[in-house]
Amino acid sequence: MLPSYNYAYAKARVIGALLKLENCSVFAEMSLTLNSRVYTPDVCVYAKRDVDLSLSEPIEINDMPMLVVEVLSHTVTLQEILDKFDIYFDSLVKSCWLVVPVAGTVIVYASPEQSQRFRTGDIVDEQLNLTLPLLEIFDDD
């Protein structure tokens, strides 16, 4: 099933907001091999790194992102995303964000058992010491 209009727009807004963070490198739909399976989060965020597009593609990325972001869509259940978060945390990803476009909400998971919901103000990820205005994602302008 193809991604929806709202999902695609929310994902683009998340990427745009994260790209404004000077100390981060942001990647869309990068494949991660975990436990002999390939997972493709909507967004992966690493500490700032150099990327030279003129060089050949890395065959395999061995280091895990510090942050994984998934955007809830009509094609994936909440439980499927939470199950992936468990796998990401087991693979040493430090933080996972769930973006819920229909609710205008971002849920920041510091672990599978610890989360914080943001509907207004700033998204604060204490695990990564990141702050991002929620309006960067859900502003109607």
Image: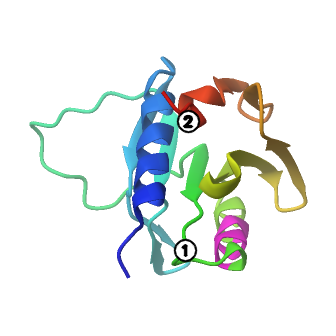
Res 33 quadrant in image: bottom left
Mark 1 residue type: His
Residue under numbered circle 1: 74
In whole angstroms, how far apart are the C-alphas of marks 1 and 2?
Answer: 19 Å
Q: Of callouts 1 and 2, which one flags the residue occurring earlier in the amino acid sequence?
A: 1
Q: Magenta includes 26?
A: no
In the image, the segment drawn in magenta is 80-86
Figure disc tally = 2
Asked which secondary structure carries label 2, the reply is helix
Q: Residues within 10 Å of mark 1 (few under 14, many from 20)?
A: few
The percent coordinates of residue 34 (x first, y second) are 53, 71
| Residue 47: x %, y % from top left | 52, 31
Closer-to-camera residue (60/44): 44
**Residue 133 sits in quarter:** top right
The amino acid type found where label 2 is placed reads: Ile
The answer to whether residue 24 of the structure is visible from this angle is: yes
Q: Residue furthest front?
A: 141
The answer to which quarter of the image holds residue 15 is: top left
Nearer to us in this view, 23 or 122: 122
Which residue is the site of mark 2?
Answer: 137
The location of residue 113, given as percent across then percent down, is 90, 60
SS majority, magenta: helix
The answer to whether residue 62 of the structure is visible from this angle is no
Residue 136: image x %, image y %?
A: 55, 28
In this image, 48 relative to 35: left or right?
left
